Image (cartoon, rainbow, N blue to C red):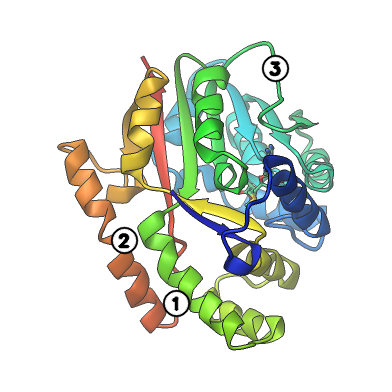
Amino acid sequence: MNETNGGGSGSERTGAEIAASVLDFYKELPFNYRQSAAQHAKGIRKNDMVRTYPGMAELFQRPSTRVLEVGCGVGGFANSVAHYYGCEVTAIDSNPVATERAVEVARELSLDVTFQVADLFEYAPGRTFDVVVSLGVLHHTKDCAGAVRRVCKDFVGPSGHALIGLYHSYGRQPFLRHFENMKSKGTSEDEMLTLFSAMESRITDKTHMLSWFRDQVLHPHETQHTLEEMIPLIEDCGMSLVSTSINRFQKFSSLDALYAEEKTYQGRAEAYLVDGKYFPGFFLFLVRKE
Ligand SMILES: C[S@@+](CC[C@H](N)C(=O)[O-])C[C@H]1O[C@@H](n2cnc3c(N)ncnc32)[C@H](O)[C@@H]1O
């Protein structure tokens, strides 16, 4: 596991300090935030984001699927699952500013999603779920491995699935080093925002762009991981790998082949940087409970 705290120094903060800094950071501006709830709703109506995650639509189309999103932010994924698939969706996030927006968006779309303010380490739903989704969240906690265990062991029910997205050790480092270099040379935040905006030109809403820039470049705490590091954890929770973005969700011949492929992420990330393009340095894995 690689760790990057705010400022890049390997400071020794307690778990409570890390959680408080992450919460304060997202209270100021939640990730994926847009100018209005109406704009979020428009985006959801226009595009089913679930389709960007291969294999998920099929799971949500199963009758009576109960879904939990952990770290739902402003609710883009949770509201999409309810809007397009009619699933029973519960979604939690530690940031009340984010869940407030998620509730407003659900109202715009006349959806009945349960959004709750809760810390994933303390949340006790008293039940399990068929599908649990957590995208870009667990690497911002005090204990990513513990958070993955919490999702897989405590929240996923028998024969259930979990889709987890994390920063990737090989894929993320070139981007981080690039911006750390700029920071050490005294580049201002405004200049870095301009640079980031040029790299990620698909985002057009200014508030949305700022929320991405802060999340990617100014975050107070993140860790990076590999599939190779995650598989033993997952197996320990009685789960096995179904598919992963490492090989574009294709069938895989062996885990070793995936571990070899994930090492190529570093070269790909470096090539994107040379072209002035944003490489997310993020990977996803879909796992199933036996
Ligand atoms: C990068 S954002 C991702 C939000 C959403 N999944 C998305 O993709 O738009 C990370 C989210 O994790 C939430 N979060 C961080 N630590 C958490 C915790 N311990 N329990 C619940 N939510 C947490 C943050 O408040 C934030 O909304």
Residue 230 % position (x, y): 38, 37
- Can you tell which mark lies on residue 265? 2
Q: Earlier in the sequence, mark 1 or mark 3?
A: 3
Residue 272 % position (x, y): 38, 75
Residue furthest to the left in view is 253
Q: Earlier in the sequence, mark 1 or mark 2?
A: 2
Closer to the observer: label 1 or label 3?
Answer: 3
| Residue topped by disc 3 | 125
Image vertical order of residue 188 relative to residue 4, above or below: below
Closer to the observer: label 1 or label 2?
Answer: 2
- Can you tell which mark lies on residue 204? none
State yes or no: Cβ of the residue under disc 2 lies below 8 Å from any atom of ligand 1.
Answer: no
Question: Is 285 left, or right, of 196 in this rendering?
Answer: left
Q: Quadrant of residue 112?
A: top right
- Can you tell which mark lies on residue 277? 1
Residue 52 % position (x, y): 46, 48
Image vertical order of residue 110 relative to residue 248, above or below: above
Identify the element where label 1 is drawn.
Answer: loop
Question: At 45% from the left edge and 35% from the top edge, which residue is drawn?
Answer: 56
